[in-house]
Image (cartoon, rainbow, N blue to C red):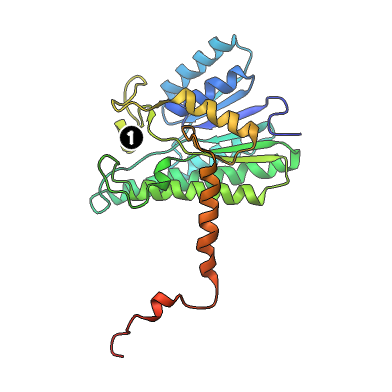
Amino acid sequence: MTWDSGPGTAVVTGASSGIGAEYAGQLAVRGWDLVLVARRDERLTALRDEVRGRTRDTVEVETLVADLSRPDDLARVARRVAAQDVSLLVNNAGINGYGPFTEAEPELLAKVVEVNVVAPTALSRAALPGMLARGRGAVINVASLLAFAGGLPPGPLPHRAVYGGTKGYVVTFTRTLAAELAGTPVRVQVVCPGLTATEFHLGRGETPVPGAPRTHDDGGMPAADVVTASLAALSAGEVVCVPGLRDASAVDRLAAAELGLRDGSGPSLASRYRTVEHPGA
């Protein structure tokens, strides 16, 4: 069996807008039943009704209102994710907490880590044992190309030290986990969109963006294209999906560069450090 050997139930976090809502729509059209997770009850209800109308009530749609920065809510979602009917988990929920690191509120930065790191880790851990036992399943983790932005300065990029760090974690976590699960029927993927036409940049994550779903003014790739690329890449067995990347070999070059860095694990000190004079010598 494979992850897509007949639709089952897909859990999508951060489903109330943007990429998450698009995953819900595209999966429903493919026949997947859905568990939609987000903070905004009214948005989830509207999306549920939209999906039911689009599919003529041929799929089941369950809503689960939860704030994944709250341990009790996360535990409740994890219990649902661990259920036997779940064959696909989409860890899409995320907040940005943008701002200069020394000026950002510590409470907000902690929330960024809880939502972007702790939640996908906990939910993946809840989902995977059952998927492996049933011989079927997949986990999609939504990261960001800002995971690779490193030391690029703000302007036009945002101040993003913690956000970029959390998305770097998601990339490394997913790639390492995929290697661990190689040879099993379960697939793991990380999606790294660039700027996407959603409402993500309209808030920092302290509270949900109010009002009806909308997009920010900077444009970007349509969320539908991000999800289309992700699902196609998952079927093709790609672990790292960059929806706008034309040269797919760039991912292989990244792995080759990492291998070069790991040459530094030997017992000998690099010669350039031997020339440094120690204070007091």
Q: Secondary structure at mark 1?
A: loop
Depth check: give the residue in front, 116 or 258: 258
Residue where numbered disc 1 is placed: 207
Depth check: give the residue in front, 170 or 251: 251
Does residue 64 appear anywhere in the picture? Answer: no
217 relative position to 230: left or right? left
Question: Which quarter of the figure has residue 77?
Answer: top right
Residue 18 spot, x, y in % from top left:
42, 26
Does residue 205 appear anywhere in the picture? Answer: yes
20 relative position to 199: left or right? right
Depth check: give the residue in front, 237 or 139: 237
Instruction: Determine whether 229 is above or below 31 in the image.
Output: below
Q: Residue at x 58, y 40 (%)?
A: 189
Mark 1 is on which residue type? Thr
Residue 137 spot, x, y in % from top left:
67, 36
Residue 106 spot, x, y in % from top left:
30, 51
Q: Residue at x 30, y 34 (%)?
A: 203
Question: Which quarter of the figure has residue 236?
Answer: top right
Q: Residue at x 32, y 43 (%)?
A: 97
